[in-house]
């Protein structure tokens, strides 16, 4: 991980009730504390100051921005956690990737596992990898880059980043999987645009969106 310099400023709250807290995470901020005091500043610790009962449900990579749901009660945390586990949640991301991605729609189904000697990198492995499936749709493209909407059906670590790399179209600005582009972009071009969950108390489907800042 390069020198950690998280962005300052308030965290935008998209929605709040007695059970749920939905925020728009900025790029460059860890979801949870890393190892060591220099990596203590994170989204969770910042939210704890304003919402003392806040509880983690899922994570986004440090350099990914966008919609994250937190629980405000133990019951909500269990309920939401289960939704992620059994894939009842629906997640939509926006990314800018290298080159012209064709065909315009498709799916990537490649099993993933941690690349132990090169942690935290993940890699495709057909022998020991866990199943991973990503749908995609190209929104616009040129010879230099494509803007795509990504639909992860599974929630593996670095799934979208490795699947795009496997297609030959890594995400622009990704220090880990496309380091040759990292200097040309102010951040990794990946944003969690929309998240759908069922409310832990009444089961009602709810959808939350945050527009991509790129």
Image (cartoon, grey):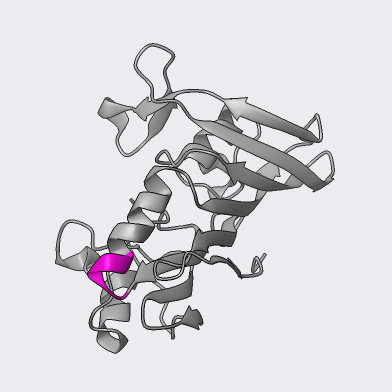
Work out whether residue 179 or residue 27 is closer to the camera in this orientation and state it: 27
Q: Nearer the viewer, residue 123 or 117?
A: 123
Residue 38: image x %, image y %? 20, 66
Where 137 falls versus 112 (above or below)?
Answer: below
Image quadrant holding the C terminus, namely: bottom right
Which residue is at a point 69% across and 39% down the rendered structure image? 136
Please report the bounds of the magenta region as a residue range.
Answer: 72-76
Note whether 116 is above or below 8 in the view shown. above
Residue 192 is at least partly visible in this image: yes
**Residue shown at 40% from the left, 74% from the top:** 20
In the image, taking residue 211 as reference, residue 155 lies left or right, namely left
Q: Is residue 37 left or right of residue 87?
A: left
Question: Residue sitting at 41 percent across and 52 percent down?
Answer: 83
Magenta stretch contains residue 74: yes
Query: Looking at the image, is 78 positioned above or below residue 111?
Result: below
Q: Which residue is at 56% across, 60% downward?
A: 196
Q: Residue furthest bottom?
A: 50
For the residue pair 32 and 3, the one nearer the viewer reads as 32
Count of numbered tags: 0
């Amino acid at each position: 991980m390069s020198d950690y310099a998280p962005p300052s400023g308030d965290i935008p709250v998209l929605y709040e009730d007695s059970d749920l807290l939905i925020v728009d995470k900025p790029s460059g901020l860890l979801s949870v504390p890393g190892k060591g005091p220099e990596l203590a500043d994170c989204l969770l610790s910042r939210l704890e100051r304003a919402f003392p009962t806040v509880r983690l449900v899922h994570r986004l990579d440090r350099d990914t921005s966008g919609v994250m749901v937190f629980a405000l009660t133990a019951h909500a945390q269990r309920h939401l956690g289960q939704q992620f586990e059994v894939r009842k949640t629906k997640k939509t991301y926006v990314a800018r990737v290298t080159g012209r991605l064709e065909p315009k729609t498709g799916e990537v189904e490649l099993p993933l596992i941690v690349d132990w000697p090169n942690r935290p990198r993940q890699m495709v492995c057909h022998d020991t990898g866990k199943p991973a499936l990503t749908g995609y749709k190209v929104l616009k493209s040129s010879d230099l880059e494509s803007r795509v909407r990504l639909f992860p059906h599974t929630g593996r670590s670095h799934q979208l980043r490795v699947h795009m790399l496997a297609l030959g179209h890594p995400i622009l600005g990704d220090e880990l999987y496309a380091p040759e582009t990292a200097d040309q972009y102010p951040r990794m071009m990946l944003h969690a645009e929309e998240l759908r969950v069922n409310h832990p108390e009444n089961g009602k489907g709810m959808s939350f969106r945050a527009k991509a800042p790129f």
